[in-house]
Amino acid sequence: MVNDVGVSDRVAVDGDNPDDLPPLAMEDHVCQNCGLSYQEISIETARQVIQSIPTKVREAVFAIPSEIWRERLRPGGWSVAEYLCHVRDVYSTYTIRLHRARTEDRPALEPMFNDLRARRFRYNESDVHAVLDELTATAAGFCEEIDRTGSEHWNRAVTRLPTETRTARWLVRQAMHEGRHHLDDIHDTGEALIPRGLMVQAAPESVRDQDLHGARFDHVRLRDATFTDVQITGASLHDINLTGLEIRGALLNGSRLRGGELANVEISGELRNVVMNGVDIAPLVDAELNRRMPERAKMRPDDSDGFREAWGILERLWEGTVARATAFPESELHRSVNDEWSFIQTLRHLDFASAAWVGRMILGNPYPWHHLDLPWDVSSRFRARLPPGWGEIPWDREARPSLGEVLEIRHERQAMVRQVMAALTDDQLASHVTCTEPGWPQLENVPFKECLRIVVNEEWEHRLYAERDLSALENFGSEGSPNV
């Protein structure tokens, strides 16, 4: 059952008698479950959260198979459908409560009698789709009542039991808390029931080598699915729940996101012409990163002196990063953080990048590789489409060389690039290079400048990744790895 405090009550209390009512949360309530502090919640913040609840509840409900919407986890507990009906009734009830607080002198509020409502009004037999629409209406109505309540009204008092006096401000905070908690209850109930085998049809383990061009997917659940080397160019997604989605190595050029909600989102990548709510944020992000890291602005040089300066900065910064890494046990330097390369794998990849773009493209060595060089991770299907000679390039992701072995190769590759930078002229930068021998890169008439810019960019970005992951390893310490 559910109490009037705003959290699920796991204790079997009947709740039909006023004497059985659990106490209301206090004006200065701090939730032990979610940490929410009522005194820190402004009216405007609460209104924004309440306004978002119907959409979030709809997404949560449709993420759960309809076959288990009416299943209960335990006797006396509530189903997804019952939680949904309760949230709808919370906002209709609190609309009237707030209206009475605004227009009456210390009105006495009737208890909601949550379990009685669920039984008498047949919550578990309700039309879920209709209730979702009704929730949208009741939440909107409550927001309208908030808008009608002036600043002079927020301290007006209401009572439920004789000893319970609360303000109009508390009503809004409480209603927000109810919505947030019962949204979690819907999530938790669905998550707990799905593993019990209540799915009508299990998802196939794997879908491979199929052309689904023009296919249509309705009411499809792909939770925890994995997509590798999947083409969805030109696809249209509507009413999609992408909560917790992780995307790596994706091309999103020309994509449009309309009516989306982005909260607690982390984006790492190259930004160009990224317009959010009418504002191109790419220059803003670029300026802020340059402010935080002044050397970053020097990582896109145009002349030979600029390239020499950039490479000198990179060698100096990397010297500090390597010194930091040597303070770790070597086993830590083979550990992966969040499925990214380990520190040693990062150095191996930079060795590969220098060999590819300087050793092969600029110096003309068709096979500049060391057996510990590490190309980027690609799918087997993509690997099959690579040019002739790619199969001869080293690709041993699981190798575990010592830091000393990798640094020896690293110093050789840095010296190679340093020598190219030292002799660099502006005329060279304006020239083009070609390498058509089997292997990679296999390109014609590539700007000399672009080859060096790729190496400079790789060195800059991967050092930031390495520093980030070393910090993560420090934070986890001996308690465990973020991801091994």
Image (cartoon, rainbow, N blue to C red):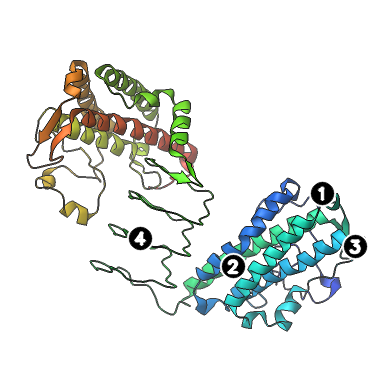
Are the residues flagged by discs 3 and 2 in contact, CB closer than 8 Å?
Answer: no
- Residue 60 x %, y %: 54, 66
Q: Amino acid under label 2?
A: Ile
Taking the image as shown, residue 397 lies to the left or right of residue 462, namely left
Residue topped by disc 3: 104
Query: Residue 226: which numbered mark, if any?
Result: 4
Taking the image as shown, residue 215 lies to the left or right of residue 109, namely left
Packing grade of label 3 (10 A; few <14, some 14-19, many >=20) is few
Q: 435 or 208, which lies in front? A: 435
Indicate which label's residue lies in the foreground, 2 or 1: 1
Q: Distance between the residues labelled 1 and 3?
A: 16 Å
- Tell me the quarter of the picture where residue 389 sits: top left
Lower sequence index among marks 1 and 4: 1
Residue topped by disc 1: 151
Q: Amino acid under label 3?
A: Glu
Packing grade of label 1 (10 A; few <14, some 14-19, many >=20) is few
The residue depicted at 26 percent of the width and 40 percent of the height is 400
Q: Distance between the residues labelled 2 and 4?
A: 24 Å
